[in-house]
Amino acid sequence: MSHPSAASNRIDTTDFPDLQHFFDLAGSEQERLLGVVLGTIRHFFGGEQALFAGVEDWRASGKTEYPLPALAFAGVLMFLTHLGARRQVGLLLRTKATIETFNTLFGSGFPHGDTLDHGFSGLDPREMQAVVSGMPRRLIVKKSLDQFRLLDKYFVVAGDGTGTLSFPKRHCQHCLTRKHNGKLLYYHTVLEAKLVTSNGFALSLMTEFVENPGPNPTKQDCELKAFYRLANKLKAAFCRLPIVLTLDGLYANGAVFDLCGANGWGFIIALKDKDLPSVNQEFESLSPLQPENRLIWITGKHKEIRQAFRWVEDIRYTDSAHREHCLSVIECLETKPNSKSREETTKFKWVTNLKVTKANVVALANEGGRIRWKIENEGFNAQKNRGYALEHAYTTNPTSAKIFYYLLQIAHMIEQLITKGSLIRKASLQRLGSGKNFAFRLLEALRNTVLTKAFLKAVTQSRFQIRFCPDTS
């Protein structure tokens, strides 16, 4: 193992006119990578200390070896480096270099994984949720995401649930239960509202844990019940944000329509032929009478995709609670070659409360309705199968489990900002490639490079911008 090197002997404490000058002096790839990571965090969120300033430490003041920001940031690094387990913190991250670096950053050493678990057990999860929600809020305030607005107005927010943990025995009193192959399974799920964009961002705005109030509830909690709780929290946290919710067919009901209308939100919800029978019937009856509400759109890298749109507006719908709604329905028949170069046609259909025209139907469908899959792919799939180990039980403590979940969301957002941002190119780190490579390189940089005060001052004082590619698909 190589000895840790200080980053960097070439860097002094003079002012830096821009970050490019800093990168020129920070010669090694590991130094440049750490400069990108810390530079991104400090540029958008004020730094690793400021990021967790709103979380109150429950431990006795003056009797703790590690300050709370050090614990939280160590947890973030565990996820950023894709260690996959709390045990790996002590085995791989607690090196001489990281201990000295944390001493520079926080005035402490690098905590053990068990110390993280204990420190998180007494925190208020609502305060960590505020940290998570505050990150995309800062990006919105800075107008960093304006280029991804739908119709130059709305931020698209995808809502969906996913499983996180499952156990053969009861994990805690809040476990959900179901029969699987004749056996009782205990499990946990969460409902997420993520801001999604065309270039692949899936940034967590709000989380609602789907959990029972006790071990023997009259009725179990479920995703739809959790949605109403999440919606209230989302409105409170982002009361003035112009939002369009993109949701799956589970949410195609009058209560959701009414809630979105009351909150001033648009919605684009997947509509199956068997759902909302009166709305589907009205759509099929009125569509032949409105030939002007049709559009053919040719797209794809080689113009190989043909999309045939039709839509109907002002469909009246009365739900089971006798609430009246005015809806529009969009249908898209997409024809494109399959893997065997044979043409296949897929039907997509959505119900929405937005006005549909020839000028916006393509955007509503492709940048609104169909972008919902990014919460699955760039969101849940990335966190489960691309190094974050979302389904791993990082602790048996219910409170700590929520804190670890929030830290995972924070780490994933930071990685997205780095890998989709322009600092990677400025630092000549384009060869990092996949997220797996990024995590491995970052781990090695942390293990082998000591961050000095001069290095951190240079990152802090350097003036720079971070821009995001409009489309990385």
Image (tube, helix red, strand yellow):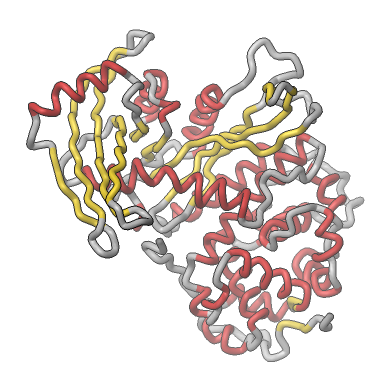
For image coordinates 41% across by 58% down, the residue present is 199
Toward which corner of the image does residue 217 lie, by quadrant?
top right
Image x and y of residue 366, in percent: 31, 47
- Looking at the picture, how far across and down is residue 214, in whole percent? 74, 19
- Tell me which corner region of the image, top left, top right, bottom left or bottom right, holds residue 124: top right
Q: Where is 173 relative to 146, above or below?
A: above
Would residue 95 be found to the left or right of residue 226 on screen? Answer: right
- Residue 325, image x, y percentages: 28, 19
Foreground of the two, 293 or 246: 293
Taking the image as shown, residue 231 lies to the left or right of residue 213, namely left
Q: Is residue 169 above or below residue 152?
A: above
* x and y, in percent, of residue 187 in the image: 70, 30
Q: Is residue 437 left or right of residue 284?
A: right
- Residue shown at 28% from the left, 59% from the top: 300
Q: Residue furthest bottom?
A: 10
- Answer yes or no: is residue 143 visible: no
Residue 127 occupies which quadrant of the picture? top right
Q: Quadrant of the C terminus?
A: bottom left
Total marks in image = 0
Tell me the residue at 29%/13% (across/down). 318
Q: Is any part of residue 259 visible from this angle?
A: yes
Q: Nearer the viewer, residue 387 or 48?
A: 387
280 left or right of 84 in image = left
Residue at horizontal 73%, vertical 55%?
A: 84
Q: Is the N terminus in the top left, top right, bottom left or bottom right quadrant?
A: bottom right
